[in-house]
């Protein structure tokens, strides 16, 4: 595991903690998001890589896996 951070999300009127784990590995340059992401979350891959590049950082080469937990709750974008 490369990094683990915590965030929060809203489900109806309730809030819950979201644990985000990121892992980098060799292989083809691809970003995989797991943990029941909806279409808006999946589309954020391009926005995130662009924001990192525009901030002066370099996106790591190879496969990047992003795990959103808990996996039993769908993660929805705005």
Image (cartoon, rainbow, N blue to C red):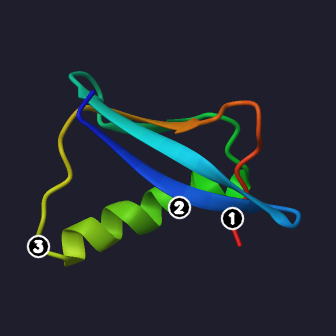
Q: Residues within 10 Å of mark 3 (few under 14, many from 20)?
A: few
Evaluate if marks 2 and 1 touch, with contact meaning CB atoms under 8 Å apart: yes
Which residue corresponds to mark 3?
56
Q: Residue reaching furthest right? A: 12
Between label 3 and label 1, give the one nearer the viewer: 1
- 11 shown above or below 4: below
Q: CA distance from mark 2 to mark 1?
A: 9 Å
User: Which residue corresponds to the image point at 18% horizontal and 76% vertical from the top-left?
Assistant: 55
User: Which image quarter is the N terminus in?
Assistant: top left
N-terminal label among 2 and 1 = 2
Residue at image x 21%, y 22%? Answer: 26
Horizontal and vertical percent for residue 41?
62, 56
Q: How many marks?
A: 3
Q: CA separation, marks 3 and 1?
A: 26 Å
Q: Residues within 10 Å of mark 2 (few under 14, many from 20)?
A: few
> How many residues crowd around disc 1 within 10 Å: few (fewer than 14), some, or many (20 or more)?
few
Quarter of the image with the C terminus is bottom right
- Choose top left, top right, bottom left or bottom right for residue 57: bottom left
The nearer-to-camera label among 2 and 1 is 1
Q: Which residue is mark 2?
A: 44
Task: Give the image quarter of residue 28.
Answer: top left
């Amino acid at each position: 595991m490369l990094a683990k951070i915590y965030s929060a999300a809203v489900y109806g009127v309730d809030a819950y903690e979201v644990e985000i784990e990121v892992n980098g590995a060799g292989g083809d340059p691809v970003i995989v998001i797991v943990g029941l992401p909806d279409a808006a979350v999946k589309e954020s891959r391009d926005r995130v890589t662009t924001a990192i590049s525009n901030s002066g950082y370099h996106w790591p080469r190879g496969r990047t896996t992003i795990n959103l937990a808990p996996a039993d709750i769908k993660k929805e974008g705005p």
